[in-house]
Image (tube, grey):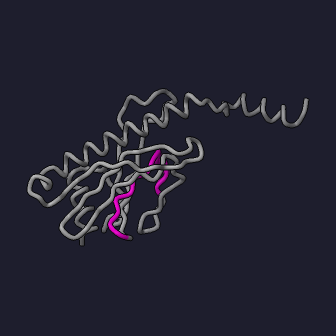
Amino acid sequence: MSSMQQLVDRLAEQGYVAKSDDLEQQQQEWLRDLDNLMDTLEGWLKPGVEKGVFRVSREQETLAEEDWGEYETPALRIRTFASTIRVRPRGLRILGAITDSNERVVGARGRVDITLGPARVMLLRFVESDGASSATPASWKLVGDDRNETKELTEEALAEALESLLG
């Protein structure tokens, strides 16, 4: 048996079989979670839209990732009187995020950036990982706000993050 065949057999025994259906399912769950996130953010921003403080528009971003190639994701543009804040997915594959206080956050399965110019707040997606289809919605954590802490994404946390970006 060749060395390559031995490697292939060993990897297959250890579960390293790449299944395109699994990759497609992961991408579909990522896109579903992104749609849900954008819907949630739009809902939280609605009072500001109604008062004319924000103008929010849903957009599309093209991402390119090694496993999936190029694909379209939802994004948001939030306009204020003098600024434009962007909410843009950065990718499903996250090796680890570094907070402003140099802490490493691991275990994320997706990243979305909220930016105003060079200022940035990250949203990291966490999912239950039991090997089966994830029927449980993702949880999102906010990283890199003015207190350099990681916290659950809530309406209050979003307001604080936007306030820190708008300074």
Q: Position of residue 118 (x, y in %)?
A: 38, 70
Camera-nearest residue between 158 and 152: 158
* Relative to 7, 164 lies left or right: left
Nearest the eye: 9 or 19: 19
Q: Residue 28 at what x, y percent from top left?
A: 45, 34
Which region is colored magenta? 105-117
**Image location (x, y in percent) of residue 16:** 67, 34
Per the image, is 3 magenta? no
| 75 lies left or right of 50 | right
Was residue 115 drawn as part of the magenta stretch in this picture? yes
Q: Quadrant of the N terminus?
A: top right
Q: Residue at x 46, y 55 (%)?
A: 105
Tell me if 25 is positioned left or right of 86 in this view: right
Q: Image quadrant of residue 161?
A: bottom left
Q: Quadrant of residue 85?
A: bottom left
Seen at 25% across and 56% down, the residue is: 158
29 is higher (above) or lower (below) than 100: above
Residue under the point 48% across and 37% down:
27
Q: Residue furthest left?
A: 51
Residue 32 percent coordinates (x, y): 38, 36
